[in-house]
């Protein structure tokens, strides 16, 4: 154990030294970030995974990549006036076949572009199962929220920080390949890096996960900077309101101090969202909310999406089409038994056949994205 912590400390010190040297010239200026925001306009969309995939692996592996479903469901995103989607990647398909993985990413981008939708790719993710395995993925556990989602990278890296450098080719191969691609809005380098997944997987997390995740967060910015992407980098803060810089965690100092644009998550009611936006204004950069919308928690499109539009804060709700991720069920489905569809969906907008969960909700979204009157019927046309 002492040897492991020594390795972590050495990597952290080496990474931080390089990080301080590289950060100043590499991070975008405020003016450059504002110029990007002016060109992109108001980004509005959802976190996207096709309804036929239970996790990132099932979405991206060659045997289960599903362009037909992706095309159809991105068409529904376009019908709402969504102009962007946030999509999670994974290092394992890259390791299996990097060329094939890049080809599938390019096919996804082509389908998104067909529907006038830009893409935000997420490189790493600390949420849910710490033991991803390539190949056929498990069937969903009935009535359980995100029962099959997997972390990227998995435990084999986070428990062994001396292996983190093995992830550099994945980051630089992906970002470098698409570094000038105008179909990509920005790169989300690490989703909730300090999430320990309590209660679902807390007992299975490596004891050194947070130390390893902090090192990987720093390294990912460095690796991405080295290939010079034309798109901005970010990693979203997700708990707290970030009003007092003296109270920021080590993760938040990196996320807020090195991101080209500021991103955050909030699943609370409007008053909580307002506090977050007001606090993040102090950092003087464009702001995007990359996760929100959990109906039973008071995080609803009406009025939060309208507030985001007025504030020119980008908005990506969690979930889109109800499917194998089962995110219509709440987080507490890991500790509480559900036996049927909840009366109030937790996330998601459409059923698998394109029928909206709430016609009024869809109409509200369309009014704020500027496509009111389009598709006024209950079912969205293919």
Image: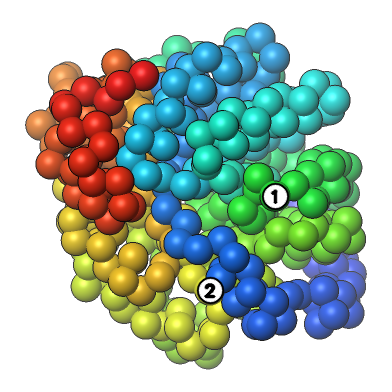
Cα gap from disc 1 to disc 2, whole angstroms: 18 Å
Q: Looking at the image, which is closer to me, 363 or 271?
A: 363
Q: Quadrant of residue 268?
A: bottom left
Residue position for label 1:
182
Q: Looking at the image, which is closer to me, 160 or 225?
A: 225
Residue at 61 percent of width and 17 percent of height: 65
**In the rendered image, the vertical position of residue 255 relative to residue 141, given as above or below:** below
Q: Does residue 200 appear to the left or right of 341 in the view shown? A: right
- Marks 1 and 2: which is nearer the front? 1
Residue at 33 percent of width and 40 percent of height: 80
Q: Quadrant of residue 348?
A: top left
**In the rendered image, the vertical position of residue 252 relative to residue 63, given as above or below:** below
Q: Position of residue 318 (x, y in %)?
A: 38, 44
Residue position for label 2:
286
* Residue 318 is at least partly visible in this image: no
Q: Does residue 225 appear to the left or right of 348 in the view shown? A: right
Q: Position of residue 190 (x, y in %)?
A: 63, 54
The secondary element bearing badge 1 is classed as loop
**In the rendered image, the vertical position of residue 101 relative to residue 27, given as above or below:** above
The secondary element bearing badge 2 is classed as loop
Q: Are marks 1 and 2 in contact (CB under 8 Å)?
A: no
Q: Quadrant of residue 342?
A: top left
């Amino acid at each position: 154990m002492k040897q492991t912590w020594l390795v972590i400390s050495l990597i952290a010190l080496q990474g931080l030294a390089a990080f301080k040297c590289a950060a100043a010239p590499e991070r975008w200026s405020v003016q450059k970030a504002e110029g990007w925001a002016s060109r992109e306009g108001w980004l509005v969309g959802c976190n996207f995974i096709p309804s036929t995939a239970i996790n990132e692996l099932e979405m991206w592996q060659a045997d289960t990549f599903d362009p037909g479903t992706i095309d159809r469901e991105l068409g529904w995103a376009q019908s709402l006036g969504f102009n962007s989607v946030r999509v999670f990647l994974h290092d394992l398909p890259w390791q299996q076949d990097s060329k094939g993985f890049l080809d599938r990413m390019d096919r996804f981008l082509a389908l998104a572009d067909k529907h006038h939708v830009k893409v935000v790719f997420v490189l790493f993710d600390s949420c849910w199962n710490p033991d991803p395995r390539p190949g056929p993925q498990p069937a969903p556990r009935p009535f359980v929220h995100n029962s099959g989602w997997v972390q990227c990278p998995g435990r084999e890296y986070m428990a062994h920080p001396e292996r983190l450098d093995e992830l550099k080719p994945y980051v630089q191969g992906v970002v470098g390949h698409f570094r000038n691609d105008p179909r990509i809005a920005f790169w989300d380098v690490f989703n909730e890096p300090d999430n320990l997944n309590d209660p679902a997987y807390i007992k299975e997390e490596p004891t050194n996960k947070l130390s390893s995740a902090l090192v990987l967060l720093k390294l990912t910015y460095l690796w991405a900077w080295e290939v010079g992407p034309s798109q901005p980098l970010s990693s979203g803060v997700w708990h707290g309101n970030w009003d007092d810089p003296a109270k920021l965690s080590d993760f938040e100092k990196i996320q807020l101090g090195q991101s080209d644009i500021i991103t955050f998550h909030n699943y609370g009611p409007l008053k909580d969202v307002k506090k977050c936006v007001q606090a993040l204004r102090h950092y003087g950069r464009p702001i995007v909310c990359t996760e929100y919308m959990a109906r039973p928690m008071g995080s609803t499109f009406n009025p939060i999406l309208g507030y985001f539009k007025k504030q020119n804060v980008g908005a990506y709700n969690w979930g889109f089409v109800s499917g194998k991720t089962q995110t219509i069920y709440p987080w507490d489905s890991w500790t509480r038994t559900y036996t049927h569809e909840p009366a109030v969906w937790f996330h998601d907008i459409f059923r698998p056949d394109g029928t909206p969960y709430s016609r009024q909700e869809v109409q509200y979204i369309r009014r704020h994205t500027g496509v009111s009157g389009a598709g006024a019927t209950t079912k969205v046309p293919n």
